[in-house]
Amino acid sequence: MANLITLSRLLLLFVLVIIAYQAPPALQLLNVPLLGTIFLMDAFDGYIARLRNETSQFGALFDIAADRIVENVLWVVMADLNLVPVWVTILFITRSFLVDTIRSYGASRGQTPFGMMETRLGRFLVAGRTLRLLYGIAKALTFGYLLLIYPLPAVAPGLYAALEPEIDWCKDLLVYTSVILCVIRALPVLGEFVLREDGPFRFFTKTRPPR
C-alpha cells in the first residue's frame, strides 16, 4: 500500500507537469493544491508503511528515489518556465547526486544517512528535525508560490502589473532561502565525508599515530 502511494506521487507529478505546459492559464492554478497533495503524500506513505508494518529496504529506497525525482523535476520545470535561474536548478541537482552518493557509500558500510554525521554541528544541520522541517517547508512554499504566480499574468494581468515588484521580491526571498538551506545542509555532509579518516579521501587527513 505504501509503495502504491509513492507511485501515485510520481503519477501526480507528471500530471502537474502536463498541466503546467499544456493547460489553459486558469487551470494551471490547480497545480498549487496538486503540489500540496504530492508533498502530503510524502509524509502519508511513511505513516502507512509503519501502521501496516510494510517497512522494507525497497520501500525506503523507492521513497528516497521518488523524493529526488519530485524535487529535481520541479526544479527543471521551474528553470524551463523561466521562474528561477538555471544555476539554481543545477545547484539542487548537483547537491542531490553528491549527497545521495555519499549516503550510498555510508550505507555500504552499515551507516544510516543521518548516522554518518559525526560532529554536533553536522547532526544539527543535517539530521536535526528543525532544519529538516524548515528545509522541506521552504521548498514546498517556493514551488507552490512559483506555480501560483506563473499563470497570473494571463489570469489577472491588472493585479500582476500592480503587484509585480512585490511578487518578484517574494519569489526571490523564497528561492534564495531554499538555496541557502540547501547549501548549509549539504556542506557538513560533503565536509565530513572528505575529512573522515576511513573514507576514500583520507589523504586530506592526518593519520593518527599508533598508541
Image (cartoon, grey):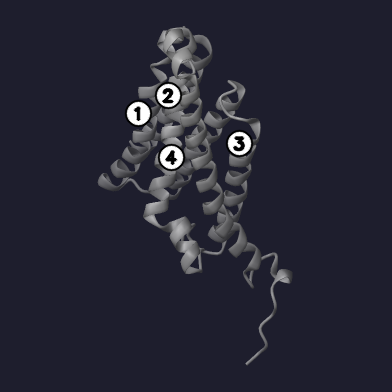
Write down the residue under mark 3.
Answer: 88
- Point out the frontmost of discs 3 and 1: 3
Q: Disc 1 versus disc 2: distance between alpha carbons?
A: 9 Å
Residue 140 place in picture, x, y as percent: 42, 35
Residue 37 marker: 1
Residue 77 place in picture, x, y as percent: 56, 25
In terms of sequence position, does the residue under pointer 4 or pointer 2 come before the other? 2
Question: Is the residue marked by circle 1 packed among few (<14), some (14-19), or many (20+) residues within 10 Å?
Answer: some
Write down the residue under mark 4.
Answer: 138
Residue type beneath disc 1:
Thr
Q: Disc 4 versus disc 3: distance between alpha carbons?
A: 14 Å
Q: Is residue 86 left or right of residue 29?
A: right
Q: Using the image, determine if residue 96 lies above or below residue 88.
A: below
- Point out the frontmost of discs 1 and 2: 1
Residue type beneath disc 3:
Val
Question: Is the residue marked by circle 4 packed among few (<14), some (14-19), or many (20+) residues within 10 Å?
Answer: many
Residue for point 46% across, 24% down? 167
Residue type beneath disc 4:
Ala
Element on which disc 3 rests? helix
Residue 12 marker: 2
- Camera-nearest residue between 64 and 205: 205
In terms of sequence position, does the residue under pointer 1 or pointer 2 come before the other? 2
- Point out the frontmost of discs 4 and 1: 4
Query: Is there a contact, CB below 8 Å, between mark 1 and mark 2?
Result: yes
Q: Disc 4 versus disc 1: distance between alpha carbons?
A: 16 Å
Q: Classify the position of the C terminus by image quarter.
A: bottom right
Element on which disc 2 rests? helix
